[in-house]
């Protein structure tokens, strides 16, 4: 791994908050092991191995029932580690893949059979090279036929320019990590309100109220991020998801304790009804196509 890469927390606390039975960690990753699933030669970072066995052990330890595993940029468009994890988990996991425009219909069908239900478009410049929007549109039209959706990752300063493209997508669109707001500016700042307005205007847009550790200025226990996530949960209760983001790739400031991240949940979803939607009903409807 890179010399400045922080490995995942070796001994997270048992959460004080007990998640309801059937809860879904709707954003996490598997990396490698590199000896079996090599990292992409085009990667912008080299992580530590974070294999499926570690992810599933954490799932059980934190009290979750299911995972949505998201392909990260260090594996590029080689989804082998993701597919392997999905096949091991069976009905307990679904996947979000990253695909190239030359992928075949047969390959997409095989991914669908393994449990992939979305593709991810990454616009974070420090993580990926620029891809023409036309390429993304072509992929979007193909995966829409499978009933898949699109997960998008971008940083707040880039949202304004991306809005016309995002609103043109023909599927449900899930925005990672609340669009990465600058929490020092406050919930009422026009930058965050632009994101809120995007969700209000487009009923097909969802968001993950995840990664307080990436957004915080104050550090743990992430009180400065709570108002942003809570506003989204209370405003769009049927279109929010939550995830650990384990193993927290590219964290530079600190490595979060996953148990402590779980303890943030009742602060952003303060009622049982909101937690039921956030952790169970919404991810089950989107990824398992069931009414939980």
Image: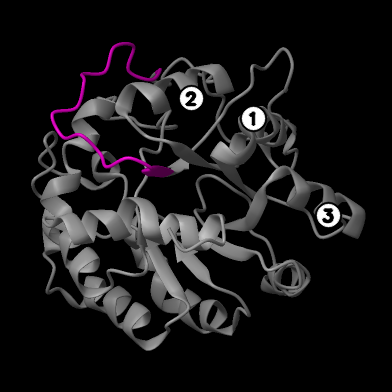
Which residue is painted at 32% across and 83% down in the image? 200
Which residue is painted at 75% across and 38% down in the image? 78
Q: Which mark is residue 85?
A: 1
> If you read the primary sequence from the N terminus, does the residue marked by circle 3 or circle 1 appear first?
1
Q: Which mark is residue 146?
A: none
Residue 221 visible to the viewer: yes
> If you read the primary sequence from the N terminus, does the residue marked by circle 2 or circle 3 appear first?
2
Q: How many marks?
A: 3
* Disc 1 and disc 2 in contact, CB within 8 angstroms: yes
> If you read the primary sequence from the N terminus, does the residue marked by circle 1 or circle 2 appear first?
2
State the separation of the CA atoms marked 3 and 1.
Answer: 17 Å
Residue picked out by circle 2: 55
Quarter of the image with the C terminus is: bottom left
Residue picked out by circle 3: 109
SS class, disc 1:
helix
Relative to 82, is 286 above or below? below
Which residue is painted at 72% across and 12% down in the image? 35
Residues rendered magenta in the picture: 7-25
Q: Is residue 186 left or right of residue 123?
A: left
* Disc 2 and disc 3 in contact, CB within 8 angstroms: no
Residue 20, magenta (yes or no): yes
State the separation of the CA atoms marked 2 and 3.
Answer: 25 Å
User: Callout 1: few (<14), some (14-19), or many (20+) C-alpha neighbours within 10 Å?
Assistant: many
Quarter of the image with the N terminus is: top right
- Residue 250 horizontal/vertical position (percent): 42, 32
Which residue is painted at 70% across and 33% down in the image? 87
The furthest residue to the bottom: 201
Residue 195, magenta (yes or no): no
């Amino acid at each position: 791994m890179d010399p400045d890469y922080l490995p995942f927390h070796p001994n997270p606390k048992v959460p004080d908050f007990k998640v309801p039975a059937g809860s879904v960690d709707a954003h996490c990753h598997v990396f490698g092991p590199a000896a079996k699933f090599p990292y992409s030669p085009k990667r912008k970072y080299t992580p530590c191995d974070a294999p499926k066995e570690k992810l599933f052990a954490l799932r059980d330890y934190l009290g979750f029932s299911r995972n949505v595993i998201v392909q990260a940029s260090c594996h590029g468009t080689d989804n082998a580690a993701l597919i392997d994890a999905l096949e091991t988990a069976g009905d307990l996991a679904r996947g979000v893949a990253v695909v190239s425009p030359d992928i075949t219909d047969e390959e997409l069908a095989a991914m669908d059979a393994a449990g992939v239900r979305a593709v991810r478009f990454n616009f974070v410049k420090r993580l990926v090279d620029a891809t023409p929007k036309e390429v993304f549109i072509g992929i979007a039209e193909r995966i829409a036929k499978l009933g898949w959706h699109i997960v998008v990752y971008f940083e707040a300063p880039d949202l304004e320019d991306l809005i016309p493209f995002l609103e043109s997508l023909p599927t449900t669109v899930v925005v990672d990590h609340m669009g990465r707001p600058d929490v020092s500016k406050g919930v009422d700042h026009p930058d965050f309100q632009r994101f809120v307005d995007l969700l209000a205007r487009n009923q097909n847009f969802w968001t993950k109220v995840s990664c307080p550790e990436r957004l915080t200025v104050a550090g743990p226990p992430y009180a400065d991020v709570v108002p942003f996530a809570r506003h989204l949960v209370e405003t769009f209760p049927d279109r929010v998801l939550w995830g650990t983001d384990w193993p927290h790739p590219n964290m530079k400031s600190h490595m979060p304790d996953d148990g402590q991240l779980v303890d943030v949940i009742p602060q952003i979803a303060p009622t049982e009804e909101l937690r039921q939607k956030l952790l169970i009903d919404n991810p089950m409807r989107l990824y398992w196509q069931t009414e939980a």
